[in-house]
Image (spheres, grey):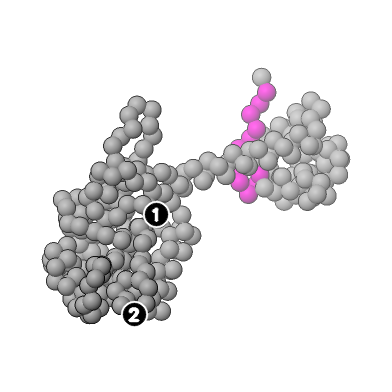
Amino acid sequence: MAAAFPHLSTAELETLLAALDPQRGDSGSLADSLADPPAFLARIGLVAGPVALVAWLERWRAAGGSQEALLMAVQALLDQRRCEAAARSIELVWSGPDAGAGSITRDQSVLIRQLVERAEQRLLLTTYAFYKGPFIKELFQLIRERMLALPKLQVRMVCNIQRDRGDTASPETLIRKFQQQTWSRLWPEPPAPALFFDPRSLALEREKAVCHVKAVVADQELLVTSANLTDAAQLSNFELGLHLSSPAHADDVWDHFDRLIHQGLLQAVG
């Protein structure tokens, strides 16, 4: 039975791939390159090449394996490794009824709670709408408890303040109404998150625009979703999101909203 290819790190596989690729390396023919596998591995920087790899390369050469086939095999192994890593870092999350037997789903409402519970440094929640149902009440209480337990935890929320059609009240009046009738009910006691909104949503003299993003950043994790922070969206509606365990993407989203805040494109409520 053929021996399995020895386990190599991704960096080692990339080094081997470059050495085998005639367009990238200077390895020459397979006979020249692998006539002495330990020397070949040392030449390409794998000085401490695994003994199993040396033996595997010797068997490959003795069996008449071609450099082109070995190149394709290493490339396929690298592609598989990268696909598996991507699958681990990205998952689909759903809201709404279970699709039944055979479905593979992750409950979005459960994930949001877990993100809050895991946050230690920063937490950002953005939504177009939120209403105080039982789930949102429990979620906000969980966030408050997290803030009390971790005073250095930076918590921000971004929401929309609505101007109804035909309403000509000043932006200041609508902000005050939102604070008194909506936010005070959603968050009745301190400590409270820093709350921001897009002031264009209250414009009277120019076309309105809103912040319609629905996302969560919790330390190095990111959730991008179609679901608002409402019980209906989290528990009943069909909604779909992507959960990324990606520091780079989490940083990108946090930093983008940070710039919007510092440039005044998002303004604090109160």
* Image quarter hosting the C terminus: bottom left
Q: Residues within 10 Å of mark 2 (few under 14, many from 20)?
A: few
* Image location (x, y in percent) of residue 47: 71, 48
**Magenta residue check for 11:** yes
Measuring from the top left, give residue 229's x and y in whole percent: 26, 55
Q: Give the answer, above or below, for where 168 lies relative to 125.
A: below
Secondary structure beneath dot 1 equals strand
Which residue is more in the foreground, 191 or 54?
A: 191
- Amino acid bearing label 2: Glu
Q: What residue do we see at 29% from left, 66% from top?
A: 160
Mark 1: few, some, or many residues within 10 Å (few <14, many ≥20)? some
* Of labels 2 and 1, the one closer to you: 2
Residue 46 appears at what percent x and percent y? 70, 47
The kind of secondary structure the magenta stretch mainly shows is: loop
Residue at the extreme top = 1
Q: CA distance from mark 2 to mark 1?
A: 32 Å
Q: Which residue does the image show at 39% across and 54% down from the upper left?
A: 224
User: Which dot marks residue 224?
Assistant: 1
**Residue 190 has which mark?**
none
Image point (17%, 57%), residue name: 132
Vertical position of residue 193 compared to residue 37: above or below: below
Q: Which residue is mark 2?
A: 205
Magenta segment boundaries in residue numbering = 2-13
* Picture layout, residue 227 above or below residue 4: below
Q: Amino acid at mark 1?
A: Val
Of residues 192 and 208, the one nearer the viewer is 208
The residue that appears at 24% across and 59% down in the rendered structure is: 130
Tell me: 85 left or right of 97: right
